[in-house]
């Protein structure tokens, strides 16, 4: 007998999340806790068949000026293998919940690429969202099962050169978990968002407060001539390190501070016995010079690695008001998140 219930034992949830090869960051209980802290309503459920736990999933209710929607992001998470039958049951359950909450639409995003599940979404009435730029369909990851010399050897020649140059320069790397040190990073990030015209993430400070407390996030800063010129927040969860947020001072863009940060983050991930370093999103076609992520994609790919693919973000319209959301996302398609 199949049934869906509210979350039972958080420790079991954490264990299932931790064991995933592709760590589902947005189904992590601390991430869902962060959403509640930011004022969003959160729903956490587990799916059972004959009392056997098959999957878990958390939905976040987003209330924006343009409308309300429920977001099933990077879920459901399966206890063992993907099961399209269970996926369909969870999608139907989520659809009914969204209607009960009087949401304008239900959104599903960052789920592993699977033709059968995409078919289920389409036959359930989902359409491709215009929200793709904020939820990359292609990510770049680096396997960490090689020693440092081998990792350097597999990088682009220019990346190796700039890493070595940064190590032999007067750049000073600062590694910190202190929330107060975000005051050194956030102005850089804000200036970058204004300069590049992208939509800045909300809740970075709140996220760092929660995750750094458990040693799951660190802030890497680079100082040059007594000035902080670059920084990045790196998460360490499950078997994965994740490149979360970054920024650099435009006046110092020719100094290889970003290369130093990424190399130190990779080494920190190896020290923590992580198997994968996740650079996050790249453009679907890294040779497309017109894509807003072109330069960023070349930077990430240069460190070596491989692509992983996700289904496109899909929306299930539930009210006519969805049209407004669709048009706003269309207008924002040229904006992107770092």
Image (cartoon, grey):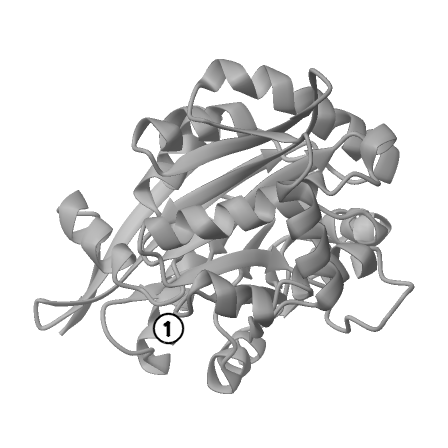
Relative side of 54 to 196, left or right: left
* Image quadrant in which you'd find residue 140: bottom right
Relative side of 292 to 93, left or right: right
* Image quadrant in which you'd find residue 137: bottom right
- Nearest the camera: 138 or 13? 138
Quadrant for the N terminus, please: bottom left
Mark 1: give few (<14), some (14-19) or many (20+) Cα within 10 Å: many
- Nearest the camera: 337 or 83? 337
Q: Is residue 71 above or below residue 298?
A: above
Residue 68, horizontal then vertical, whole percent: 59, 41
Relative side of 71 to 133, left or right: left
Residue 147, horizontal then vertical, whole percent: 42, 65
Residue 291, horizontal then vertical, whole percent: 85, 62
Residue 35, horizontal then vertical, whole percent: 45, 34
- Nearest the camera: 62 or 155? 155
Residue at image point 64% right, 60% down: 136
Residue linked to disc 1: 87
Residue at image point 56% right, 50% down: 263
Residue at image point 34% right, 37% down: 30
Q: Is residue 74 above or below residue 36?
A: below
* Image quadrant in which you'd find residue 286: bottom right
Q: Is residue 130 visible?
A: no
Residue placed farthest to the right in the image? 290
Residue at image point 45% right, 50% down: 267
Residue placed farthest to the left in the image? 51
* Circle 1: element type: helix
Residue placed farthest to the front in the image? 168
Q: Is residue 157 visible?
A: yes
**Number of dots carrying numbers:** 1
Quadrant for the C terminus, please: top right
Q: Is residue 51 above or below residue 270?
A: below
């Amino acid at each position: 007998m199949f049934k869906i219930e509210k979350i039972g034992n958080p420790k079991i949830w954490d264990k299932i999340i931790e064991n995933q090869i592709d760590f589902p960051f947005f189904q992590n209980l601390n991430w869902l806790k962060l959403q509640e802290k930011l004022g969003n309503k959160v729903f956490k459920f587990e799916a059972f068949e004959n009392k056997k736990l098959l999957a878990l999933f958390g939905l976040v209710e987003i209330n924006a000026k343009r409308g309300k929607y429920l977001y099933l992001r990077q879920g459901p998470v399966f206890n063992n293998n993907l099961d399209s039958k269970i996926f369909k049951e969870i999608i139907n359950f989520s659809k009914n919940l969204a209607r009960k909450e009087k949401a304008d639409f239900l959104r599903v995003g960052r789920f592993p690429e699977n033709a059968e599940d995409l078919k289920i979404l389409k036959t359930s009435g989902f359409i491709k969202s215009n929200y793709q730029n904020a939820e990359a369909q292609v990510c770049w990851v680096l396997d960490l099962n090689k020693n440092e010399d081998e990792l350097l050897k597999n990088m682009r020649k220019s990346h190796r050169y700039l890493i070595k140059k940064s190590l032999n320069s007067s750049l000073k790397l600062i590694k910190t978990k202190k929330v107060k040190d975000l005051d050194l990073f956030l102005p850089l990030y804000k200036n970058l968002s204004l300069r590049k015209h992208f939509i800045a993430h909300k809740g970075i400070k709140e996220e760092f407060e929660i995750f750094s407390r458990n040693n799951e996030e660190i802030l890497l800063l680079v100082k040059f001539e007594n000035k902080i010129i670059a920084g990045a927040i790196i998460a360490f969860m499950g078997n994965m390190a994740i490149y979360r947020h970054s920024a650099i001072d435009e006046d110092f863009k020719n100094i290889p501070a970003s290369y130093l940060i990424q190399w130190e983050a990779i080494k920190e991930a190896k020290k923590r016995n992580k198997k994968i370093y996740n650079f996050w999103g790249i453009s679907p076609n890294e040779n497309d010079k017109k894509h807003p992520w072109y330069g960023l994609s070349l930077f990430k790919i240069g460190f070596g690695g491989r692509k992983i693919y996700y289904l496109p973000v899909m929306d299930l319209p539930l009210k006519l008001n969805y049209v407004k959301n669709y048009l706003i996302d269309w207008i924002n398609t040229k904006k992107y998140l770092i």
